[in-house]
Image: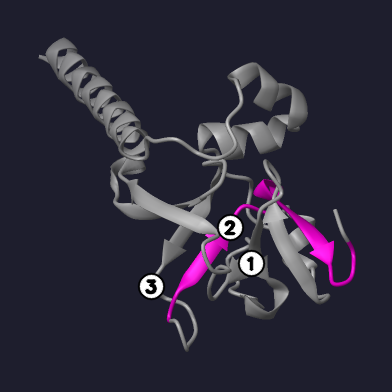
Amino acid sequence: MEMSRRRFTAACGLRAAAAGAVSFALARAERTGKFEVTKTDEEWRRMLTPEQYSILRKHGTERAGTSPLNGEKRPGTFVCAGCGLPLFSAETKYESGTGWPSFRQPLDDAVGTSVDRSFFMTRTEVHCRRCGGHLGHVFEDGPQPTGLRYCMNGAAMKFVPAGDRD
């Protein structure tokens, strides 16, 4: 009886892991299409740091509280680390207490969204509309006037201070 309980538990664990992998693959497959900036996987690996590649191209997440962009308070623009597209104005950044750079809203025509069903939950993924790079997720628990919290991976972006050109 003990052995069959172990086998049952192991089978349930394997089934749950497989379901999670399938769910993640389906969520990524929903965001198919052509982007203005396309590169081969090898080209992305060469131009991005390992952390940027993991986040932008493989939908990874940086550890909370590790991004230097969390403390960025100067006027300027946050741009995609993959293609340089301006994404967020510093004017919309706020301290959410989550450990990731958070914004009330993106710049016009800067991001796209898709359904992310990974990790047994449904969230709204945010990606760069020009290169398709994964940026983070948007939640409906942000400040007014939008009520949205764009919770972004700092490694997926670069900051360009006002007056500077990248």
- Residue 1 covered by magenta stretch: no
Judge from the rendering whether residue 139 lies leftward or rightward of residue 87; answer left or right: left
Do labels 2 and 3 touch, CB within 8 Å?
no
Is 96 on the left-hand or right-hand side of 31?
A: right
Q: How many marks?
A: 3
Q: From the viewer's perspective, is 70 left or right of 117?
A: right
The residue type indicated by label 1 comes to: Phe
Secondary structure of the residue carrying numbered label 3: loop
Front one among 124 and 71: 124
18 displayed left or right of 40: left
**Could you tell which of marks 3 and 1 lies nearer the N-terminus?**
1
> Which residue is under mark 2?
152
Verify CB contact (< 8 Å) between mark 1 and mark 2: yes
Secondary structure of the residue carrying numbered label 1: strand
- Which residue bears the numbered disc 1? 88
Task: Name which residue type carries label 2.
Answer: Met
Whether pointer 3 and pointer 1 mark residues with C-beta atoms closer than 8 Å, the reply is no
User: Which residue shows up at 47% across the image and 88% down it?
Assistant: 145
The stretch in magenta equals 147-164
Q: Earlier in the sequence, mark 1 or mark 2?
A: 1
Query: SS class of the residue under badge 2?
Result: strand
The residue tagged 3 is 140
Instruction: Name the residue: 75% across, 61% down.
Output: 69
Q: Is residue 58 visible?
A: yes
